Image (cartoon, helix red, strand yellow):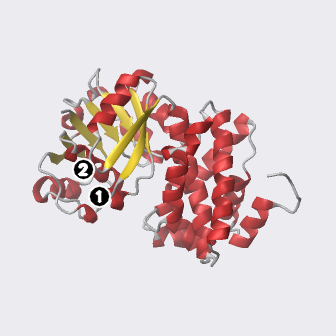
């Protein structure tokens, strides 16, 4: 099997790292936090970011050294917070092997540039498209850590690269499917976080499944429209990376985006919700970045616009919902 390095030992990086180790690969985790490196390397656990994983496999080790982390890797998996990815990856660029496949687990749009994570990774590492792979799907970290059955879409312009990564993460509980739609996979995974904020907000405000179902439907239509305008395939948004990930993220308190929105719906400010969530959810930064991209592509995004009012102007759920649906009777 392969020698694989995972850059970033947060919850999802650790969870996917364990999937790769369960599939029989030698997995080296890189973390900037010395205490996490020590925890994985010497205690075979990540009690800081993913305690639910329990004892990690013996073929899963850790380092804090950038050069040592990637120098022998055949596959490099990136699981760094999207808004910090460019700067972090540039420090690895001199050490990345010329034939390594680079995989992104990140879900976001870079604030300020409006660029997808495939664009950010390729620019930061000076990487050709045939060496890039995106992985996305309904993959809540804790449930993956508990080895609950799930699947993911593995997308690349290079079918051989997609197959190599799919084979590396195929286990009896983790089922990969391949695609050539990198743009759709990337955009579905990042844009659904905006919808998850809104659904969480509806539940936090005391509303039920009817309201959540309406928001999810409008959100899916909206992110599909923007994705297609950017060059994605519409069918990708009906699959694991789109609808599947949307349902998982909008339905579980394990989702940071859902929980952040829930706290906003209860009446917490963005600052208070950040403190309660132990950090800012990815969808918070993605919302404004999505709007920048939508304006460039000439696509109207009512849900993203309404959520941006929540984050920037302190709108309540009632104000957000009114901005979303408007007062006119229109076709669906």
Residue on which the image places disc 1: 145
- Looking at the image, tell me whether mark 1 or mark 2 is earlier in sequence order: 2
Above or below, comparing residue 228 to residue 82 in the picture:
above
Tell me the residue at 27%/36% (across/down).
168
Tell me the residue at 18%/55% (across/down).
56
Extreme residue in the front direction = 172
Q: Is residue 14 left or right of residue 266?
A: left
Residue on which the image places disc 2: 18
Percent across and percent down for residue 274 are: 50, 67
Q: Is residue 292 left or right of residue 279?
A: right
Q: Secondary structure at mark 1?
A: helix
Q: How many marks?
A: 2
Tell me the residue at 24%/29% (across/down).
74
Quarter of the figure that contains the N terminus: top left
Q: Is residue 155 at all visible to an observer of this figure?
A: yes
Percent across and percent down for residue 91 are: 33, 35
Percent across and percent down for residue 13 are: 32, 49
Q: Is residue 84 left or right of residue 116?
A: left
Label 2: how many residues lie within 10 Å, few (<14), some (14-19) or many (20+)? Answer: many
Q: Is residue 214 left or right of residue 2?
A: right
Confirm or deny contact between disc 1 and disc 2 (CB under 8 A).
Answer: yes
Of 83 and 244, nearer the camera is: 244
Instruction: Name the disc covering residue 8, or none.
Output: none
Label 1: how many residues lie within 10 Å, few (<14), some (14-19) or many (20+)? Answer: many
Percent across and percent down for residue 58 are: 11, 50
């Amino acid at each position: 099997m392969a020698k694989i390095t995972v850059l970033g030992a947060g919850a999802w990086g650790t969870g996917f790292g364990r999937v790769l180790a369960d599939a029989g690969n030698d997995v080296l985790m890189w973390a900037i936090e010395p205490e996490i490196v020590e925890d994985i390397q010497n205690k075979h656990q990540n009690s800081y970011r993913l305690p639910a994983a329990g004892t990690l496999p013996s073929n899963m080790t850790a380092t804090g050294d950038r050069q040592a982390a990637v120098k022998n890797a055949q596959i490099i998996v990136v699981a760094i917070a999207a808004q910090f990815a460019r700067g972090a990856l540039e420090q690895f660029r001199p050490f990345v092997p010329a034939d390594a496949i680079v995989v992104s687990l990140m879900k976001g749009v870079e604030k300020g540039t409006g660029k997808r994570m495939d664009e950010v990774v390729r620019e930061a590492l000076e990487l050709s498209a045939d060496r890039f792979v995106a992985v996305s799907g309904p993959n809540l970290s804790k449930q993956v850590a508990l080895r609950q059955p799930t699947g993911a879409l593995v997308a690349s312009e290079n079918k051989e690269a997609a197959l190599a990564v799919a084979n590396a993460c195929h286990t009896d509980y983790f089922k990969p499917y391949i695609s050539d739609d990198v743009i759709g996979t990337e955009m579905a995974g990042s844009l659904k976080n905006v919808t998850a904020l809104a659904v969480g907000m509806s539940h936090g405000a005391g509303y039920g499944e009817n309201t959540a179902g309406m928001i999810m439907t409008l959100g899916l239509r909206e992110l599909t429209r923007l994705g297609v305008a950017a060059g994605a395939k519409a069918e990708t948004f009906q699959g694991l990376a789109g609808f599947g990930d949307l349902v998982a993220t909008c339905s579980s308190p394990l989702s940071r985006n859902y929980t952040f929105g829930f706290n906003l719906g209860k009446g917490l400010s963005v600052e208070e919700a950040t403190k309660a969530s132990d950090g800012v959810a990815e969808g918070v930064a993605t919302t404004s970045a999505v709007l920048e991209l939508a304006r460039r592509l000439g696509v109207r995004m009512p849900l993203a616009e309404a959520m941006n009012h929540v984050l920037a102007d302190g709108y309540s759920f009632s104000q957000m919902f009114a901005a979303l649906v408007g007062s006119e009777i229109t076709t669906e």
